[in-house]
Amino acid sequence: MSSPIASNIAIIGGGLASLTLALSLHQRGIPCTIYEARPESASTPGALMLSPNALRILDSLSIYPQIRDQGFNFSTVAFKNAAEETTDLYHLGGAAQYTYPCLRIYRQTLLLALRSAAARAGIAIHYSHKFLSITSTSPATGTTTFAVQTPDGTTTHATASLLIGADGIHSRVRTQHVAPSAPAHYEGRVAITFAISRAQAALPAHYPSPVAIHGARGAFVLAPQTPDGAAQLLAGTQVAHPELDRDGWAALAADKAGLAAMLRRDEGMWPGTVRRVLEGMPVETLGIWPYYSVPRMESWAAEGEGGRVVVLGDAAHAIPPTAGQGASQALEDAVTFAEVVKGFEDGAGGEGEWREAVARWQRYRQQRVDRVLALTLQLNNARLPAEERAKLKDGEVWRSGGEGELAWLYCAYIVSELREFDG
């Protein structure tokens, strides 16, 4: 007899999407277990933008009040030209228009808040348990058996009625089982960034931040990462770079002098503010972020295994960070997928109904992701060197069109939209 889909859920990956999914399932009375490859002590570097659509989800999980004052709250990012004149303002949030501001916060801060909530909810998280592969499936019981490597290096097996891969851009669940023909694709560019205080950057008191300063080499970004907006800013830009393997990226990240030289190449082509920031650059804080994407997939669920192997978040659609929507869209995946699973608790529905429900969920999510990707492309084009921007057509570069224009993104009640979706 086939086991109920919601009876024994395993989530691969212990990041933001996984924890949000686990908490959303718990909120609906559905238990699950998380398998995370890294040890609990591992730290997640960097900061991220949480726009109103993400904060609305975190508020529904009682996470937002805990983190609201631990990051930098703001509404807009300013775009400046080579003369450092403000040419546009892009709204990443705004309480008056979108109920919530945008919150820039360290990833580790959000991760720890989600972990604490998971602990209070009694959600099991197995750290240092690396997913290896699916080893067998049972059509009779509707279960999937998978292998994981434990902290002592041995291999053990677990069984799930539903296996969810939220294991990132380089997802093993995707590349081994859901879409083997869809490995992550390198976009040919890498962000080189560093941390600097507002004082070290010698920014005038009136200078806006976050800001994208455009010059002949592209856009240079300054974004606060601390609640006061001054103690630490992320600074950096994108550069073209050939793809490297894992060891190669690690070596590049460790070569601080080399990264500094890459940023300072043709330094005189940047506007004055950027040149001053580069002069004060703390070289020891330099890091990289290679841009990878995930090819559009026909299905986010495996063809076999009764459709009970599914990917979401970056494992299904990696979104460049320009629009501040990478984490936000992963959180949207998580809470809407929990709603799908809720419809199949207590053994309701068969394989056909499950596959159609997942396909419908994917269609709803894909149309939102597609709109975000189109928006991100416009914003990316706005960061191109002036010579490349000049070659683009009208509409291919972002231009603000008025207040509330992003309500479709920031004000959506996505669970309600999913219920009403007819596509």
Image: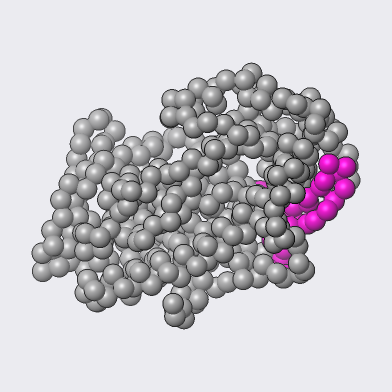
Horizontal relation, residue 33 to residue 373: left or right = left
| Quadrant location of the C terminus in the rendered image | bottom left
Q: Which residues are magenta?
A: 71-98
Could you tell me residue 373's position as x and y percent? Answer: 56, 57
Query: What residue is rendered at 22% in x and 71% in y?
Result: 351
Query: What residue is rendered at 43% in x and 56% in y?
Result: 296
For residue 174, above or below residue 366: above
Could you tell me residue 365's position as x and y percent? Answer: 46, 66
Q: Nearer the viewer, residue 312 or 67?
A: 312
Query: What residue is rendered at 78% in x and 39% in y?
Result: 215
Horizontal relation, residue 166 to residue 391: left or right = left
Q: How many marks?
A: 0
The image quarter containing residue 247 is top left
| Quadrant location of the N terminus in the rendered image | bottom left
Q: Nearer the viewer, residue 416 or 60?
A: 416
Query: Can residue 109 be seen here?
Result: no
The image quarter containing residue 28 is bottom left
Could you tell me residue 130's position as x and y percent? Answer: 31, 39
Query: What residue is rendered at 21% in x and 59% in y?
Result: 304
User: Is residue 293 part of the magenta span, yes or no?
Assistant: no
Q: How is the image coloured?
A: one colour
Horizontal relation, residue 31 to residue 374: left or right = left
Could you tell me residue 66's position as x and y percent? Answer: 59, 55
For residue 102, above or below residue 267: below
Query: Can residue 371 be seen here?
Result: yes
